[in-house]
């Protein structure tokens, strides 16, 4: 079954994003689940092989900028070993049967052999990292870096 992903938003993480809350661009609010008259809901996104519950909310009064926050957000930050300067990218994935879900990639922008690329890992326990470069012509280069297979080798 084929799926199609659409970029919702992407941003470089700041100290506030890491330690307190991730500010979600107001302009993309219509791309996320509606509050239906409320001000908060539990939002789920896929990162690696796991769906993460995240508190998605706005303030009840005053400045109502949407954010991902609270203990659930901090759990994701800690597990994923996120740092200031890492890139957080949220996609909406549409599946052929009409269902959809959200997916997140997090990584660090790097210069790989003179190419501006992203290095992605699947969390603090990741043994493999993927370096991806997307070209405007729709071409993509992926390089997987992992621990060498040295079974039986003399060290």
Image (tube, rainbow, N blue to C red):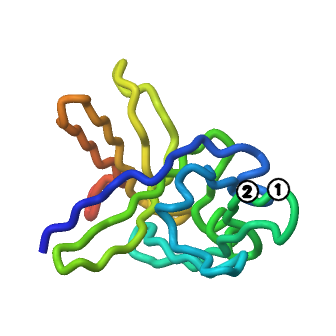
Determine which residue is flagged by label 1.
63
Q: Residue furthest top?
A: 114
At a point 23% along the width and 61% down the height, the residue shown is 4
Q: Secondary structure at mark 2?
A: loop
Task: Please say if 39 is above or below 140.
Answer: below
Task: Please say if 137 is above or below 67.
Answer: above
Residue 96 location in percent, x, y?
Answer: 17, 74
User: Whole-Å distance between the Cαs marked 2 and 1?
Assistant: 6 Å
Q: Residue furthest right?
A: 62
Residue 85 location in percent, x, y?
Answer: 63, 39
Task: Please say if 118 is above or below 29.
Answer: above
Q: Can residue 121 be seen?
A: no
Q: Quadrant of residue 115?
A: top left
Determine which residue is flagged by label 2.
65
Residue 71 location in percent, x, y?
Answer: 75, 75
Depth check, front residue: 9 or 140: 9
Dot label at residue 142? none
Q: Secondary structure at mark 1?
A: loop
Using a 10 Å C-alpha cutoff, classify the residue at mark 2 as few (fewer than 14 neighbours), some (14 to 19) or many (20 or more).
few
Q: Residue furthest left?
A: 1
At a point 78% along the width and 57% down the height, the residue shown is 19
Residue 63 location in percent, x, y?
Answer: 82, 56
Q: Can residue 148 be seen?
A: yes
Quadrant housing the N terminus:
bottom left
At a point 35% along the width and 49% down the height, the residue shown is 130
Q: Is residue 92 left or right of residue 5?
A: right
Q: Quadrant of residue 132?
A: top left
């Amino acid at each position: 079954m084929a799926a199609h992903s659409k970029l919702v938003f992407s941003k470089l993480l700041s100290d506030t994003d890491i330690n307190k809350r991730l500010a979600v661009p107001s302009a993309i609010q219509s791309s996320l689940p509606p509050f239906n008259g409320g001000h908060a809901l539990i939002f789920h996104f896929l990162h690696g092989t796991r769906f993460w519950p995240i508190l998605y909310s706005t303030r009840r009064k005053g400045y109502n900028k949407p954010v991902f926050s609270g203990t659930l957000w901090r759990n994701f930050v800690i597990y994923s070993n996120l740092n200031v300067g890492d890139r957080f990218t949220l996609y909406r994935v549409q599946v052929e049967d009409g269902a959809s879900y959200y997916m997140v990639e997090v990584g660090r922008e790097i210069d790989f052999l003179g190419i501006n690329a992203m290095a992605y890992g699947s969390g603090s326990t990741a043994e493999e990292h993927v370096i991806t470069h997307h070209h405007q012509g729709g071409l993509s280069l992926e390089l997987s870096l992992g621990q060498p297979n040295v079974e039986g080798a003399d060290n």
